[in-house]
Image (spheres, helix red, strand yellow):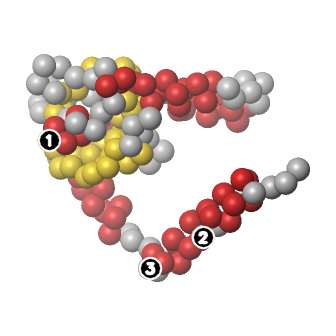
Amino acid sequence: MTNFIGEFDCKIDAKGRLMVPAGLRKQLDPAANESFVVNRGFEPCLVLYPKNDWERISSEVNQLNQYVRKNREFVRYFYRGATELSLDGNGRVLLPKRLQQYGKIEKEVVLFAYSDRIEVWDKDTYENLLTDEPEDFANLAEEVMGNVNAQNSTKGGQDD
């Protein structure tokens, strides 16, 4: 599994091509074979997944019970617009117009790379998102991460 890290300012050219920065390409797992899948993010952004990571995530999504309506709705939305992309000889990917419209992506973008994905944000949208920083980040961190160690210790430390 890929473990990306970094934040990169980039531009989309007139044809909708995005140059994937060398710093990200170096982090790409060779198993991805310079291929990605792009789809809609949960917020108004796009998400680039290395092909091998997409296959793992898709496998998890495909295990959902299709007889449950919410699962079917999630699957439709999750896969909506998903498109396979490959790096061209210049290290660029061509973002589909429909997905660019969804993400309100025009010229300047920020690539926010973490875990197994790269979020592609319109620069202004991304900067506005981060100006809404929580009033007390320490409280948010405690709320979100405070029980992580406790959960991990109970999973591994139970005697049956």
Residue kind at label 3, given as amino acid type? Glu
Q: Which mark is residue 11?
A: 1
Residue where numbered disc 3 is placed: 135
Badge 1 element: strand
Q: Which of the 4 image quadrants contains residue 128?
A: bottom left
Badge 3 element: loop
Residue where numbered disc 2 is placed: 146
Residue 105 against residue 30 in the figure, above or below: below
Residue 60 showing in the rendered view: yes
Query: How far across and down, in percent of the image, does residue 153 sit?
Result: 69, 60
Badge 2 element: loop
Query: How far across and down, in percent of the image, does residue 52 sit?
Result: 43, 25
Of mark 1 and mark 3, the one earlier in the sequence is 1
Residue kind at label 2, given as amino acid type? Gly
Of mark 1 and mark 2, the one earlier in the sequence is 1
Mark nearer the viewer, 3 or 2: 2
For image coordinates 60% across by 70% down, the residue present is 146
Of mark 3 and mark 2, the one earlier in the sequence is 3
Is the Cβ of the residue at disc 3 closer than 8 Å to that at disc 2?
Answer: no
Using the image as rendered, state which of residue 150 and residue 73 is in the foreground.
150
